[in-house]
């Protein structure tokens, strides 16, 4: 099967989108960037191919009258069991790496005790995996690092003993190991885990699904054996120059976000993207071609990185900022969105007794005021505009933007896709599709 890939190497996350030759999205992938752009691009490419195979399974079931109405009852548990298998595989890698690092000479005096604690921690982490991937589980993150770190730190605190193995020693081993595990790019994850995930799914499936087990096994086997032929690949994003692509396969973030937003919402003429390191205000024409744009300078003030810094200062998860800000009853005026001075101003506000929610509400409004300035300089806001990037998932940021747009421009149609974080990767994939079509025509 011929496909094309678009890869968006952001400073925080790397995303990939796979399209078939008809231009339909068949797979998406996302991973932490970790400043290792080459590995991140490999991991996210494999993830997009895994998702593409799941999409092909869905299409096969949808085309079979015997499975009418049962696709979601089967595919949801299948995906959860697949992720559980993947997570267990990474936990095994983590345990091996922890014991290997514990073999360093500086741990020689109490190595046995350390290895005993590590085994207890890793066994307990495995016992929690089923809960993490249960049907009703609410995970704060889908990234292995985040889930593993939360479990490990909690268990390390329980297993540590200042007289034998300190908490700091166990944490140091985790810090030395997690990057190695996280950066282990693997191929053919679907081939390794799909069969086991299928059998786990069938074991607890309703009778109507179990009766069709032979047909389901045949479908999974057929999709596993299918070969993908990547006929085009384009990279974009903050780290695009690190991609192992020829320069002809690199496009700017402006072009890709403009085209990606236009593909999601053909009526859009203005695009706002707030990424980890920069904010982009883009004007596009009816074909998705960029006609004007403005970006912030090299400073990351008012971008996703700024929010991440604030979250660290408040000891909160990034996903908690927007929800907490919406509890505000009296927004605080924030004087600066400078990342360098944010910590000092934040601590000053808290020392005055101002509530976290009110400070966060003020921070979100300050970020959007900065974005509005870029939008105005790029040409203003048209009747229909699209908010893209990871910050578009933040409800407080969206609310602040809506209020400012209404106040300055009147009512406008604001588009936000649930897949907005993939906008740049989608645009890159569309460029790859055009390049592949050009090569074929030639």
Image (spheres, rainbow, N blue to C red):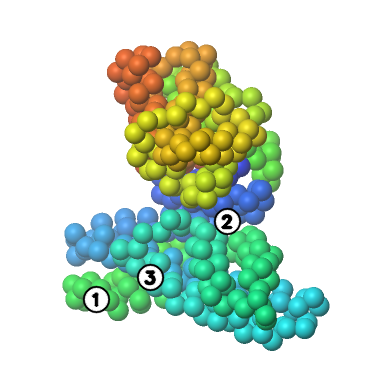
The label number, if any, that marks residue 12 in the structure image:
none
**Residue at 35% over, 63% down:** 137
The label number, if any, that marks residue 43 in the structure image:
2
Q: Position of residue 316 (x, y in %)?
A: 49, 49
Is residue 245 rendered to the left or right of residue 78?
A: right
Distance Cα–Cα, label 1 vs label 2: 33 Å
**Residue at 65% over, 76% down:** 162
| In the foreground, 436 or 5 | 5
Q: Is residue 409 above or below residue 193?
A: above
Q: Quadrant of residue 22?
A: top left
Say which element carries label 3. Answer: helix
Q: Quadrant of the C terminus?
A: top right
Q: Position of residue 295 (x, y in %)?
A: 58, 23
The label number, if any, that marks residue 210 in the structure image:
1
Distance Cα–Cα, label 3 vs label 2: 25 Å
Q: Is residue 199 above or below residue 389?
A: below
User: Reading the chain from its start, which is encountered first: label 3 or label 2?
Assistant: 2
The label number, if any, that marks residue 131 in the structure image:
3
Residue 249 visible at all:
no
User: Reading the chain from its start, which is encountered first: label 1 or label 3?
Assistant: 3
Residue 80 visible at all:
yes
Say which element carries label 1. Answer: helix
Is residue 409 rendered to the left or right of residue 283?
A: left
């Amino acid at each position: 099967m011929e496909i094309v890939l678009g890869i968006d190497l952001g400073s925080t996350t790397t995303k990939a989108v796979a399209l078939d030759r008809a231009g339909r999205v068949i797979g998406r992938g996302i991973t932490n960037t970790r400043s290792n752009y080459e590995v991140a691009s490999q991991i996210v490419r494999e993830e997009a191919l895994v998702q593409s195979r799941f999409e092909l399974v869905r299409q096969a079931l949808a085309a079979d009258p015997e499975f009418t109405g049962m696709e979601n009852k089967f595919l949801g548990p299948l995906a959860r069991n697949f992720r559980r298998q993947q997570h267990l595989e990474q936990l095994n890698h983590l345990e091996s790496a922890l014991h290997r690092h514990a073999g360093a000479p500086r741990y020689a005096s109490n190595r046995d005790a350390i290895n005993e604690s590590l085994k207890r921690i890793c066994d307990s982490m495995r016992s929690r995996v089923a809960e993490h991937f249960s049907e009703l589980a609410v995970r704060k993150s889908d990234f292995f690092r985040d889930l593993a770190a939360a479990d490990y730190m909690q268990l390390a605190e329980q297993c540590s003993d200042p007289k034998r193995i300190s908490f700091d020693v166990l944490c140091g081993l985790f810090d030395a190991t997690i990057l190695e595990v996280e950066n282990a790019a693997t191929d053919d994850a679907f081939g390794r885990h799909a069969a086991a995930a299928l059998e786990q799914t069938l074991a607890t499936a309703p009778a109507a699904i179990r009766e069709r087990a032979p047909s389901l096994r045949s479908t999974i086997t057929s999709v596993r054996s299918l070969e993908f032929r990547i006929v085009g690949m384009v990279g974009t994003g903050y780290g695009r120059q690190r991609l192992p692509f020829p320069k002809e396969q690199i496009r700017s973030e402006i072009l890709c976000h403009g085209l990606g937003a236009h593909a999601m919402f053909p009526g859009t003429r203005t695009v706002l993207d707030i990424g980890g390191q920069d904010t982009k205000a883009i004007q596009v024409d009816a074909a998705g071609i960029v006609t004007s744009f403005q970006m912030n300078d090299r400073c990351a003030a008012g971008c996703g990185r700024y929010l991440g810094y604030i979250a660290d200062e408040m000891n909160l998860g990034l996903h908690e900022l927007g929800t907490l800000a919406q509890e505000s009853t009296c927004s605080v005026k924030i004087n600066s969105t400078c990342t360098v001075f944010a910590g000092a101003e934040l601590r000053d506000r808290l020392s005055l007794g101002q509530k976290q929610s009110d400070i966060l509400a003020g921070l979100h409004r300050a970020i959007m005021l900065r974005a509005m300035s870029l939008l105005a300089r790029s040409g203003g806001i048209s009747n229909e505009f699209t908010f893209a990037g990871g910050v578009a998932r933040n409800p407080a940021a969206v609310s602040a933007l809506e209020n400012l747009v209404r106040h300055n421009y009147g009512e406008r149609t604001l588009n936000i896709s649930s897949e907005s974080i993939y906008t740049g990767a989608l645009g890159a994939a569309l460029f790859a599709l055009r390049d592949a079509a050009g090569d074929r025509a030639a």
